[in-house]
Image (cartoon, rainbow, N blue to C red):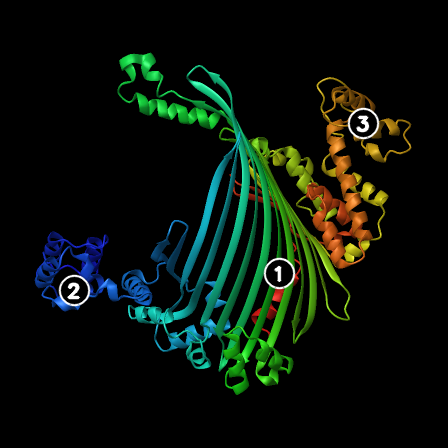
Amino acid sequence: MPVSLEAFRHRVASSVKDHKLTAAEAQQLIAEGPLTAEQQQVLRDELKSEYFASDAERNQALALFRMAPDTLRSNESDGLLDKVKDKLVDLAKDQIYRSRDLSIADFKLGDHAGICVRTQVKPLRPDDPLVVDDPHRAATTQRMEAAWQKVTWATVGGGIYPRAGFTFSLPAGAARVSAGFNSKASLGYSVLAPYPLETSAAGQLAKNLSVDLPFNPENAKALAEGTEVRLVGRGTVAANAGVGVGAQLADLGNFISVGASAGVNVGVSREGSVSLTVKRLEGDKVFVSLSTLESTTGSGSVGARVGVTASLRDNLPELGGDLFEQGGESVAKKIEKQISKWTSADLSVAHSRAKSEKVVQSYTIDLSQAEGAKAYSDLLRLDTRTADTLGAQGASSGVSFARLDQVGRTSSTSANLKLGKLALLQAASSHSEAHGTLRSAQGELTFDRARLDENYSGILSNIWAGKRATSAELIQTRQPGEPVESFLHLTQTVRGDKVTSRNDVRKFIELSSFLGAESDSLQGLADNGTFLDSFGKTDRTVDFFITDEGLQALGQVSPEQVQKAFGAAYEKLDRPWDMHYLIGDNQRAWRNTPWLATDHPRHGDIMKMLRSDSISFRAQDLEGRYRFLTGRNLTQDRAAWRDSEELSSLVSRLQQAATPAARAHVFAKANASLDLQLELATLASLAGADQVLVNNVSLHDTKSNRDLTLVHEGVIQDPQAEIDRILADPR
């Protein structure tokens, strides 16, 4: 039975995957009989002269295939563009709609430099938002399908990536000094365009990677509506230096040795990028975006390690005689590896700071107007003067424009502590600020945003309480002649709480009363033990916004009001008075917040105990005294009191900030480690529940896939969405 053309193509590809074809393999290709014209064409596409060991073997194989000797191509005459085309034709013949990322060439230039050339094909699903949510691509799809031509959209791209670098290390007594330098760059482009669902699309794919890119107005107008071309250039230069020391601490015979090492590393890098995007719109219009970004990053890290090294392979065979002759070395090697993994301790702390400057200029240009066509040609040379001049004259000039200028700063710190393979601590925090101005025909918009993120996990959270992450963001915008608009956005998540207590669930239910979300369905659940105990492993989310009116209300409150509101939330949500001691009276615990009981004769003693160090040598004695006086737990109350002080301090500093930018800076520097359920309840009490918009307060049982969602009102419109909309369509 004759083999199918597809099967023959796969057979040929398998035979020449090593870029060689032997006489035996050639004989196998004609095992089913003489080749058809289509099969001969497959061989012309797949084979090259260099695949054969000699000219004689090549001519012998071609005689078997009934093909002329001069029908094969030679690598020597192939340029880089031909290689790209060949790869893409292969893709189209095989599986044109499968994502591919291929290396066309990888050149090594000496010991410290090289160049890599890559190409990529990434098809999009018919329901991909990039297609269905874009009116121009949707219009092209409808026109092609109306002409009885099935269509898909795909991104085809390529790039050249030069690189260079070197490192060296020198001994310096007990230490070792190292330094390094590296530079990376890229010059790439991509084309998002429609393709018919047929093999002939290979020609269009190669075409988009060769000569018909929109480098002039005529080529731009020839693109299908919705086609998007992007050219990107990036460059990075980085340097680093470090000092490390190591020492042998102890030797236990010939088997075990204990060593320690420590090191410090610092580095600095600078990155720059330029991107140019061209998108074909309706009629003779095109969209052009020019973006530049420059950033500088400095970093430093400190690390230390103590480890045990085992030397068993040289010693166990001596102890066991012939017992370990067969496989003894393999067994000893595995034992050594496990000892090294489980008897080491590693600590690392890293910090980095970065500053960036970003400029985005967007234009909509009518190419039917001569001045618009000139502005387009100038933009492709990165000259914006003509387009800016026309844009300032209004839409009648054929050019509309928008410009974003943004400065950002980011600082991050991380710490990791491991004992063997066990992660004892993983913590990271970062805060970022962005200040920018958007100018367009629609007016001017200035914004400031500050964000603080923290996440934490450790041996207890991984096994018991879940991994925690918090983020707090202050966003403020202003337009000429209009009042400042600002809002706070706070989020806290707990992921993988393997043992969710009834108190965790009850606290979520009680929170609804502070948010104005009480309902008949929630009444009674807070004291329903069966319901509270029905949750196992859970994920929890608290995500909310405070409106500008709510921020103004916060600006009128005093620290005393903050303390009282926090105390009320703490007593209701955490129920610190609900103590169950093994010995003693469990009913005498105070139900009012001790640090707010200023008229109590022992208030001074209470405050001294709350301010005390929780790890002092008197801690146990203080716990007993506090319990005797209040019937409550000192450790729990101390943590809540510190949270209330922290929240009061944050509100006070926000009040003192004179400008939106200053408030953003204060908020970015604030400690966001508060329990956001308590913070949410407190802020809702102070600002008013109608000024707190809850995006999501929910508890999800991951085993039963059951949800307890208290309230889900929606989100405040982030000004970034408006900025992105104007930059995408400046008309």
Which residue is the site of mark 1? Answer: 357
Q: Could you tell me residue 715's position as x and y percent?
A: 65, 57
Q: Which residue is mark 2?
A: 39
* Closer-to-camera residue (291/530): 291
**Is 225 in front, or is 270?**
270
Q: Say whether disc 1 or disc 3 marks the residue closer to the N-terminus.
A: 1
Left or right side of 82 for 632 = right
| Numbered mark located on residue 384 in the image | none
In which quadrant of the rendered image does the N terminus lie?
bottom left
Q: Which amino acid type corresponds to the residue marked 2 in the rendered image?
A: Gln
Where is residue 33 drawn, in percent x and y? 8, 60
Horizontally, residue 148 falls left or right of residue 369, namely left
The front one of 76 and 34 is: 76
Measured Cα–Cα span from mark 2 to mark 1 = 57 Å
Spatial separation of the CA atoms under disc 3 and disc 2: 89 Å
- Left or right: residue 617 versus residue 84 is right
- Where is residue 195? Give x, y as percent: 36, 70
Looking at the image, is mark 1 or mark 3 nearer the viewer?
1
Neighbourhood count class around disc 1 (C-alpha, 10 Å): few under 14, some 14–19, many 20 upward: some
Q: Residue at x 37, y 59 (%)?
A: 117
Secondary structure at numbered mark 2: helix
In the rendered image, residue 218, in percent from the top left (x then y), is placed at 43, 82
- Sequence-first disc among 2 and 1: 2
Tell me the residue at 48%/54% (across/down): 183
Circle 3 residues within 10 Å: few <14, some 14–19, many ≥20: some
**Depth check: 552 or 525 in front?**
552
**Three-letter residue code for mark 1:** Glu
Q: Which mark is residue 609?
A: 3
Sequence-first tag of 3 and 2: 2
Gap between marks 1 and 3 measured at Cα: 49 Å
Res 641 visible:
yes
